[in-house]
Image (cartoon, grey):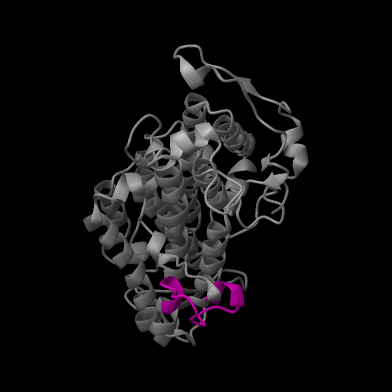
């Protein structure tokens, strides 16, 4: 998957400059983006996002464990809501961490700080998928699934065996792809790139004065921007020069979208916006910073919409000939549809699809016996509904 090396970025200008004379003060500070995502102060790196790397690694182990039918609900719940010092993971550093995946799921400042009802309902969905995987799917691991009965289903030609619930849904896929929205996208777009977080407290004054956080080399505003960066690139071997395909979450699917000729260039657009926005913080130009945040919000949201449509269309293509393959695609599509509620329309405080709208789409998809009953016409209609909110067509996203 790692096809995007430095050569991807060689085609863009090594330096980007931007100034804005509409307002006075810091809006006129020139911003020059570095060649790579490297920022220093007094010879020390100011880039830090260890917490994001930790949660990505925790998520990887958790999703993998959901495919192990020897696991219990207790062990999976403990991985999701890890407590410092518990031996929930194979990695000792993760066990020692005081961070957890669940605590940052549906937890952004902009969307959920004043909406605990939806935040709790979303967390309950993730808890429920874990519980149902253990109670519904694990006991039927050796049974061939049929409509209304959980079990296994093998893809045609001796392909992969999928383990599904009574409606054909793979809980591990639904969980993983929904987590892309509820954790990575929500924290990036609606938390760390939000002025409510970037400019909180004395952050602006401290950044203007170059006052670093206690014991650190970075200002708090710099760190918040880096934490957004970390939810996309935090598992890269060299995060300052990302190659993509470095995790099973947002990083992976940026790579997939980039490799679609209809959307080639999206990876450079996002990377360059992150660089220029971070450079704008250093230059104390908050207009340019916020302009880059809007670009990131639009492009990251596009990834979610594109892959939601892609998997609906791939599922449609296999629906008659290979139900196991179709159900696998539709399970991934389920997760990307769920993730639509965490997207962000540029210039607004709103997602492309509300939670209510997402719930309606999922209810339509899972009606009756779910994937066993869904029709090609329904999948086309749902694809059209999603595409209509974005700037791409179903044909572009679905191929």
Could you tell me which residue is drawn at 58 percent across and 36 percent down?
Answer: 278
What secondary structure is the magenta-colored segment mainly? loop
Could you tell me which residue is drawn at 76 percent across and 33 percent down?
Answer: 10
Note whether 131 is above or below 357 in the view shown: below
Q: Classify residue 258 by image quadrant.
A: top right
Name the quarter where the N terminus is drawn. Answer: bottom right
Find the magenta span and give its range: 78-95
In the rendered image, is residue 190 in sight?
A: yes
Note whether 7 is above or below 365 in the view shown: above
Q: Classify residue 241 by image quadrant.
A: top right
Q: Classify residue 260 by image quadrant.
A: top right
Note whether 361 is above or below 25 in the view shown: below
* Rendered location of residue 370, percent (x, y): 33, 64
Q: Nearest the camera: 343 or 69?
A: 343
Q: Nearest the camera: 130 or 38?
A: 38
Could you tell me which residue is drawn at 35 percent across and 56 percent down?
Answer: 106
Q: Is residue 83 magenta?
A: yes
In the rendered image, is residue 151 in sight?
A: no
Q: Is residue 10 left or right of residue 399?
A: right
Q: Nearest the camera: 9 or 265?
A: 9
Q: Is residue 38 left or right of residue 219?
A: right
* Rendered location of residue 362, percent (x, y): 31, 55
* Rendered location of residue 125, percent (x, y): 32, 65
Total marks in image: 0
Name the quarter where the C terminus is drawn. Answer: top right
Q: Is residue 260 magenta?
A: no
* Rendered location of residue 101, percent (x, y): 44, 65
């Amino acid at each position: 998957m790692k096809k995007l090396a430095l050569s991807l970025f060689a085609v863009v200008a090594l330096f980007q400059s931007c100034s804005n004379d509409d307002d006075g003060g810091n809006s006129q500070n020139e911003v020059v983006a570095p060649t790579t995502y490297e920022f220093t102060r007094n010879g020390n790196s100011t880039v830090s996002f260890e917490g994001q790397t930790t949660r990505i690694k925790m998520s990887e182990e958790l999703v993998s464990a959901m495919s192990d039918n020897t696991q219990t609900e207790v062990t999976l719940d403990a991985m999701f809501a890890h407590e410092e010092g518990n031996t929930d993971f194979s990695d000792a550093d993760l066990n020692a961490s005081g961070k957890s995946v669940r605590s940052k799921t549906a937890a952004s400042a902009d969307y959920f700080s004043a909406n605990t009802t939806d935040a709790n309902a979303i967390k309950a969905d993730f808890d429920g998928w874990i519980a149902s995987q253990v109670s519904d799917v694990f006991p039927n691991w050796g049974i061939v699934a049929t409509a209304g009965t959980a079990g296994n289903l093998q893809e045609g030609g001796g392909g992969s065996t999928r383990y599904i619930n009574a409606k054909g849904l793979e809980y591990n896929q639904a969980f993983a792809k929904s987590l892309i929205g509820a954790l990575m996208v929500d924290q990036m777009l609606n938390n760390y790139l939000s002025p409510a977080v970037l400019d909180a407290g004395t952050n602006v004054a401290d950044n203007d004065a170059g006052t670093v956080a206690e014991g650190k080399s970075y200002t708090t505003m710099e760190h918040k921007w880096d934490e957004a960066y970390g939810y996309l690139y935090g598992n890269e071997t060299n995060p300052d020069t990302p190659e993509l395909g470095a995790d099973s979450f947002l990083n992976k699917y940026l790579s997939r979208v980039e490799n679609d000729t209809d959307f080639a260039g999206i990876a450079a657009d996002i990377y360059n916006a992150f660089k220029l926005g971070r450079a704008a913080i250093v230059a104390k130009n908050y207009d340019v910073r916020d302009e880059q945040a809007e670009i990131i919000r639009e492009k990251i949201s596009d990834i979610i919409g594109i892959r939601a449509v892609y998997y609906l269309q791939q599922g449609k293509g296999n629906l008659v000939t290979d139900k196991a393959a179709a159900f696998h695609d539709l399970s991934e599509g389920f997760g990307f549809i769920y993730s639509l509620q965490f997207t962000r329309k540029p210039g607004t405080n709103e997602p492309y699809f509300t939670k209510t709208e997402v719930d309606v789409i999922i209810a339509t998809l899972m009606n009756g016996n779910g994937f066993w009953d869904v029709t090609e016409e329904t999948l086309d209609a749902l694809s059209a509904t999603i595409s209509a909110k974005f700037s791409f067509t179903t044909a572009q996203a679905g191929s």
